[in-house]
């Protein structure tokens, strides 16, 4: 029997049980209950009837049949930051042309993420999901895959869904090898927060590339020069550079995990009277729209192409989601990297 505490009452007297209460009453998983309440999903007639019966008994509000455009959930971190905002805008343009609508969910906010998995997701209102560079817990992965709708990720990794992106480790390795090739041996790293569970996949891959490049030259990373920046904005890079400036010895080159961190650090070093390059070289990652104006050497990844391909995979006329797609990256050498003085 379901727990009556899971039934919520409104002032109008309309009772609505949670999807978990329905699942317990029907003795099925929450994802199965969700699929059973949606039309066109692969659930047996017996299971569907059992779930519908439980929903009626608990007064659960059944999903309304939709007559409008298909809804695509886009799950992203930091939607107001450049990388994510560019991807979202591109996805929206492609989805609109395909007769689909985008529903945006900011999963970097704990409250918003919990609301999505506890309320929006179980309602079975989505016809597809696009994840932008985010990592999820095993339970969250199970819930997403339980939707039984097409899904695709841009960067990151979700077992069972194709990923469109670049080889993050190889890209970070190439950036570091560029600095090593210029003659630098004292290299530092401006890293994303390793404690961020949603971005840990990207962070670990780029960190691994940095260390592999050093190892290939017979070097090891000096922990004094590995700085975990707060956030991934320019202010985080600026603060990280100030920390390095307080140390007895500086590296002669820095690899930053994003262009925002690199540009923030660049500003701090130049305000401190250092020449970049010369006293210190900096390489970023992404090819942010500001990178060219900052004359920043960076790893360019084809962000727009990644977003376009992800949205196109969910075209209703495309019956095959496809396999992983790895696109090429490019090292753009500009004016912030040079030989050590």
Image: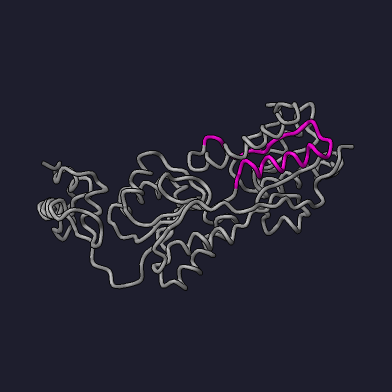
Q: Residue furthest right?
A: 341
Q: Nearer the viewer, residue 230 or 206?
A: 206
The residue nearer to you, when weighing 12 against 43, is: 43
For the magenta stretch, what is the residue range? 167-195
- Between 93 and 46, the one lying in front of the other is 46
Quadrant that contains the C terminus: top right
Image location (x, y in percent) of residue 279: 85, 39
Q: Residue at x 80, y 48 (%)?
A: 336
* Quarter occupied by the N terminus: top left
Q: In screen coordinates, is 80 left or right of 216? A: left
Residue at the image position 47 percent from the left and 47 percent from the top: 108
Colouring of the image: one colour
Q: Is residue 292 visible in this depiction of the protein?
A: yes
Q: Is the residue 195 above or below the residue 336 in the image?
A: above
Q: Residue at x 24, y 59 (%)?
A: 38
Q: Is residue 337 left or right of residue 69?
A: right
Q: Is residue 13 above or below residue 262?
A: below
Residue 322 lies in magenta, yes or no? no
Q: Is residue 173 magenta?
A: yes
Q: Nearer the viewer, residue 328 or 82?
A: 328
* Residue 2: % across, % down: 14, 43
Relative to 16, does residue 30 appear above or below in the rendering? above
- Residue 5: in sight, yes or no? no
Number of labelled discs? Answer: 0
Q: Position of residue 33 (x, y in %)?
A: 21, 50
């Amino acid at each position: 029997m379901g727990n009556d505490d899971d039934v919520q009452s409104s002032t109008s007297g309309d009772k609505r049980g949670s999807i978990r209460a329905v699942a317990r009453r029907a003795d099925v998983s929450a994802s199965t209950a969700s699929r059973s309440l949606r039309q066109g999903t692969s659930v047996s007639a017996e299971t569907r009837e059992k779930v519908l019966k439980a929903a009626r008994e608990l007064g659960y509000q059944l999903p309304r049949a939709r007559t409008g455009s298909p809804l695509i959930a886009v799950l992203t971190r930091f939607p107001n930051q450049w990388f994510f905002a560019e991807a979202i805008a591109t996805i929206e343009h492609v989805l609109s042309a395909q007769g689909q609508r985008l529903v945006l969910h900011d999963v970097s906010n704990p409250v918003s993420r919990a609301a999505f998995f506890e309320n929006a997701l179980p309602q079975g209102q989505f016809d597809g999901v696009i994840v932008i560079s985010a990592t999820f817990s095993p339970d969250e992965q199970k819930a997403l895959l339980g939707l039984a709708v097409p899904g695709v990720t841009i960067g990151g990794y979700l077992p069972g869904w194709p990923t469109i992106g670049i080889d993050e480790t190889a890209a970070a390795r190439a950036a570091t090898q560029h600095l090593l090739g210029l003659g630098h041996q004292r290299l530092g790293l401006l890293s994303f927060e390793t404690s961020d569970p949603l971005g840990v996949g990207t962070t670990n891959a780029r960190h691994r590339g940095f260390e592999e490049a050093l190892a290939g030259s017979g070097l090891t990373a000096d922990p004094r020069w590995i700085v975990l920046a707060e956030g991934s904005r320019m202010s985080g890079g600026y603060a990280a550079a100030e920390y390095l400036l307080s140390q007895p010895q500086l590296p002669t080159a820095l690899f930053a995990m994003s262009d925002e961190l690199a540009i923030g650090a660049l500003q701090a070093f130049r305000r401190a009277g250092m020449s970049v390059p010369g006293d210190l070289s900096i390489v970023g990652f992404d090819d942010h729209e500001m990178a060219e104006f900052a004359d920043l050497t960076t790893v360019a990844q084809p962000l727009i192409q990644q977003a376009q391909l992800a949205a196109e995979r969910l075209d209703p006329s495309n019956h095959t989601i496809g396999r992983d797609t790895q696109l090429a990256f490019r090292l753009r050498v500009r004016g912030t990297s040079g030989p050590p003085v």
